[in-house]
Amino acid sequence: METKVSLSDIWNILELVHDPEIPVLSVVDLGVVRDVIMNGEDVEILITPTYSGCPAMNMIESEIRMVMSEHRIPARVKLVLSPAWTTDWMSEKGKQKLKAYGIAPPQDEAISLNTLFGKTEQVVCPLCNSKHTELISQFGSTACKALYKCKDCLEPFDYFKCLK
């Protein structure tokens, strides 16, 4: 007798797939998995890259196929580019994991157009919670992050840019 797999089971299995650039986050935490569509035993997983040209997407797609195969679930993975990914899709749990990992999570108040006017967002240091930080570079360890330095604890840290 074969056990049916539920939608909840699929989402739980997808939690096992981690972002290769930020391994503390699952693709579900990151919001890359947009939807899971089940039609009988037919499973389709829709994924959206954090930005077009994201080099991690091929790896993520392969990892999703592999974990589904390990659980004996035949699934198709479909790349969906529209609507574009936004940091709004990141889970609160994911943002907390980023901070614990030493990466400042995207901040809602950082949505402003300050960058256009030569101002930088006020980013809270994930290490000491100081607001006394400065932008070092618009690009950190990956294109979706900026490099900041805390003026209190003097540590550099990545900030996951807020994308809307």
Image (cartoon, helix red, strand yellow):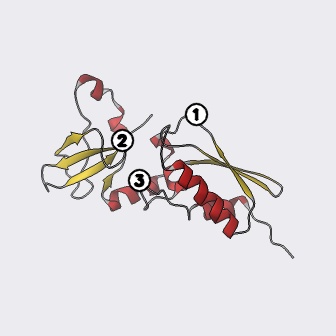
Q: Residues within 10 Å of mark 1 (few under 14, many from 20)?
A: few
Identify the image quadrant of the N terminus: bottom right
Question: Which quadrant would the C terminus be assigned to in this image?
Answer: top left
Q: Residue at x 24, y 34 (%)?
A: 120
Mark earlier in primary sequence (2, 1)? 1
Rendering coords of residue 2 (x, y %): 84, 73
Left or right position of 7 against 85: right
Q: Which residue lies under the disc numbered 1?
A: 83
Q: Which residue carries the number 3 mark?
A: 95
In this view, 108 is above or below 118: below
Q: Amino acid at mark 3?
A: Lys
Q: What residue appears at the point 45 percent right and 55 percent down from the top-left corner?
A: 94
Callout 2 amino acid: Lys
Residue 33 x, y percent position in the rendering: 59, 50
Q: Disc 2 marks which residue?
A: 161
Q: Nearer the viewer, residue 9 or 78?
A: 78
Residue drawn at point x = 27 percent, y = 55 percent: 126
Q: Secondary structure at mark 3?
A: helix
Secondary structure category for the residue under label 2: loop
The first of marks 3 and 2 along the sequence is: 3
Residue ranking furthest to the right: 1
